[in-house]
Amino acid sequence: MIDNHPILHSALTAGLIQYLSGQPLYEFCNEQLTDVCELINQCCVRIQTGDIDSDLSSMCIHTTMHEETIFQYASTDNRARLAHWVRQYSKCHSASEREAHAAYIMACAVKALGALADWMRDTDKAAWSHVAEPPTDWPWDLYCQFVEMQVDPNERIQALDQYVLYLEPITSLPCLINDELLPIADSAIKNAIRCKGGIISGMERNKDIVARDAAIIHQGRHYLASGMPERNIATAVHAWLKREVAKPPKQRLGWITLETEKALSRKSVDTILKRNLVL
């Protein structure tokens, strides 16, 4: 049975959320961290209602340490003995099947959380690698904004891939197929995949916009080199852009995509030219 109390009712997950929300990139991982903390919370609820409270920490720690080995044995064991291998490697032989399964699911969730926590920490550290130490007198919003600007989307995608990789055993082991915690893990995986898709789409849009801006800059410099008065260049480039976008798809230049097919205003063209020192 799923416990429907909020995450903050669990001392463990409350502490995790409090710590993680104090990281500058927390908003980038908020949904994924909330999902995995809910999974950890439900595992805690299941284990703590059993008869092995004194062994809880030891069982979960050892199961996390040996998660890969446990998975290798459990995934090739035709008797679906996940609980057996959890008991073997955690040295908690009194654990019931449900408790052992919860310990394994929790181990996967902890490793998934760690993948994102490591990425947040490493990105924050790399953002200040050019100075002796991070500033201590900046407003928190400004500090977070600066770190966010240093995020490499490819590294963020890798962290999400690692997050999903750690959760996938929960959905792939046959003995967990009817476990009530599986839908939480499945939802967490799907949310992370959607987030990754959004990042990739954003990267593609950015590439399209960079290509369009490069074409605008090139045309502006062409007019400038041809002797056109500077005051007329933005208007001329804007008119050129409208003509290019209005062409049939087969006659358009390669940088005109779905993202850039809408003609910009003259003011936007002027801003791009000034930002790139054409004007």
Image: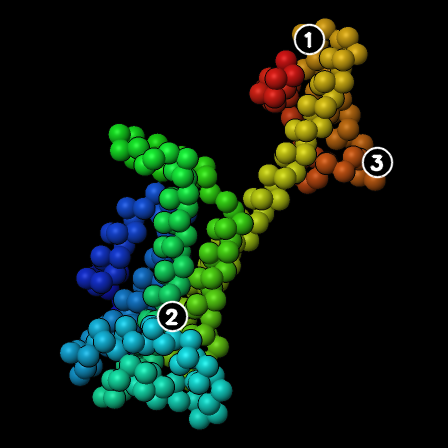
- Identify the residue shown where x is 45% and y is 37%: 149
* Residue 197 seen anywhere in this rendered image of the structure: yes
Three-letter code for the amino acid on which mark 3 is drawn: Gln
Which residue matches tag 1?
Answer: 230
Which residue matches tag 2?
Answer: 108
Where is the C terminus found, in terms of image quarters? top right
- Identify the residue shown where x is 50% and y is 51%: 155
x and y percent of residue 263 in the render? 68, 28
- Identify the residue shown where x is 37% and y is 44%: 125
* Quadrant position of residue 238: top right
Given this view, does label 3 or label 1 mark the residue nearer the observer?
Answer: 1
Tell me the distance, in whole angstroms, between the alpha carbons under discs 3 and 1: 29 Å
Which residue matches tag 3?
Answer: 251
Query: Regarding mark 3 in the picture, which secondary structure is present there?
Result: helix
x and y percent of residue 130 in the render? 41, 35
Tell me the distance, in whole angstroms, between the alpha carbons under discs 1 and 2: 62 Å
37 up-or-down from 155: above or below: below
